[in-house]
């Protein structure tokens, strides 16, 4: 099954509030984005956003230059319906982030919660990091949240690559990226399972 078919099925078969990664509020991501102290017109992309509430909450705070990308049009449609009149304020991209052509040096923030960890093949991980290097502005920020080294081994029936902070630093390595900070987070799924995440901020050189 293709990646696109897999994810469209997930978002068709389950209510968005029932997927294991569902968050009522994207609090950890919001806190990290706010910590960067950027202008409200900073270009922010949420990759593999699914039907996340992050974009809604960023709009609520005043951020006004948002792009939301996902391989699943089913997921993005649900976010668009939820946003209603405000949906047109966002640049929506239905695309595979590994193959989409991204405008060079466009984004001041690249945000990814629970997407990079699905890439278990080194060539896909390299391709992802190449996409980040292309699309993020010099001195822009990359926020990546993956399952921690002692987090779950699977998500949505797919194997994941778990990462310690040090392992993420090896992926987003000098001289292209500078490590800024990290924070551990425990996500409680709708089924009350605890999932350990590492959130890391890097700055692109
Ligand atoms: C576990 S969900 C996380 C969704 C969202 N980031 C959140 O925190 O609620 C992973 C998301 O990544 C998307 N995805 C997986 N592989 C992708 C790819 N190659 N390109 C774009 N999106 C992808 C899926 O469709 C899904 O919405």
Image: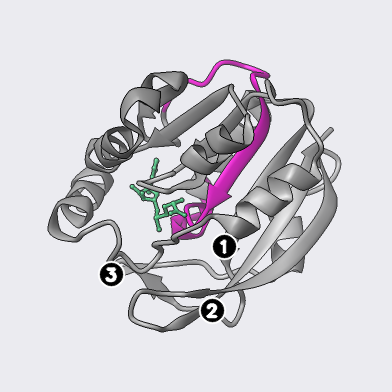
Q: Residue at x 44, y 47 (%)?
A: 53
**Residue 172 visible here:** no
Q: Are marks 1 and 3 in contact (CB under 8 Å)?
A: no
Seen from the viewer's position, the closer of residues 203 and 174 is: 203
Which label belongs to residue 146? Answer: 1
Q: Are marks 1 and 2 in contact (CB under 8 Å)?
A: yes
Residue 121 shown in magenta:
yes
Q: Residue at x 49, y 38 (%)?
A: 55
Q: Is mark 3 within 8 Å of ligand 1?
A: no
**Tag 3 secondary structure:** loop
**Tag 2 secondary structure:** loop
Residue 170 at x, y percent in the picture: 74, 57
**Tag 1 secondary structure:** strand
Magenta part of the chain: 100-123
Q: Is mark 1 within 8 Å of ligand 1?
A: no
Residue 39 shown in magenta:
no
Q: CA distance from mark 1 to mark 3?
A: 16 Å
User: Along the polypeptide, which appears first: circle 3 or circle 2?
Assistant: 2
**Residue 204 visible here:** yes
Q: Residue at x 37, y 46 (%)?
A: 50
Q: Residue at x 86, y 40 (%)?
A: 175
Residue 194 at x, y percent in the picture: 49, 82
Q: Are marks 3 and 2 in contact (CB under 8 Å)?
A: no
Task: Name the residue that disc number 3 marks.
Answer: 157
Which label belongs to residue 151? Answer: 2
Quadrant of residue 178 within the rendered picture:
top right
Classify mark 1: residues with Cα within 10 Å, few (<14), some (14-19) or many (20+).
many
Please give left or right for residue 107 compared with residue 66 in the image. right
Q: Looking at the image, how many numbered discs can be counted on the residues?
A: 3
**Looking at the figure, which quarter contains the C terminus?**
top right
Residue 10 at x, y percent in the picture: 21, 56
């Amino acid at each position: 099954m293709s990646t696109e078919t897999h994810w469209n099925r997930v978002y068709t078969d389950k209510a968005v509030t029932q997927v294991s990664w569902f968050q009522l509020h994207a609090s950890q991501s919001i806190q990290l984005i706010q910590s960067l102290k950027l202008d409200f017109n900073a270009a922010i992309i949420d990759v593999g956003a699914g039907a996340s509430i992050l974009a809604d909450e960023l709009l609520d705070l005043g951020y006004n230059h948002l792009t939301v990308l996902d391989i699943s049009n089913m997921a993005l449609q649900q976010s668009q319906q939820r946003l209603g009149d405000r949906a047109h304020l966002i640049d929506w991209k239905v695309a595979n982030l590994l193959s989409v052509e991204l405008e060079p040096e466009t984004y001041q923030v690249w945000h990814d919660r629970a997407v990079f960890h699905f890439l278990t093949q080194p060539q896909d991980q390299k391709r992802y990091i190449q996409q980040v290097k292309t699309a993020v502005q010099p001195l822009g920020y990359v926020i990546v949240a993956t399952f921690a080294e002692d987090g779950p081994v699977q998500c949505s029936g797919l194997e994941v690559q778990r990462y310690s902070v040090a392992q993420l630093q090896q992926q987003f390595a000098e001289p292209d990226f500078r490590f800024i900070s990290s924070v551990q987070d425990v996500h409680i799924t709708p089924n009350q399972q605890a999932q350990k995440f590492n959130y890391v901020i890097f700055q692109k050189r």
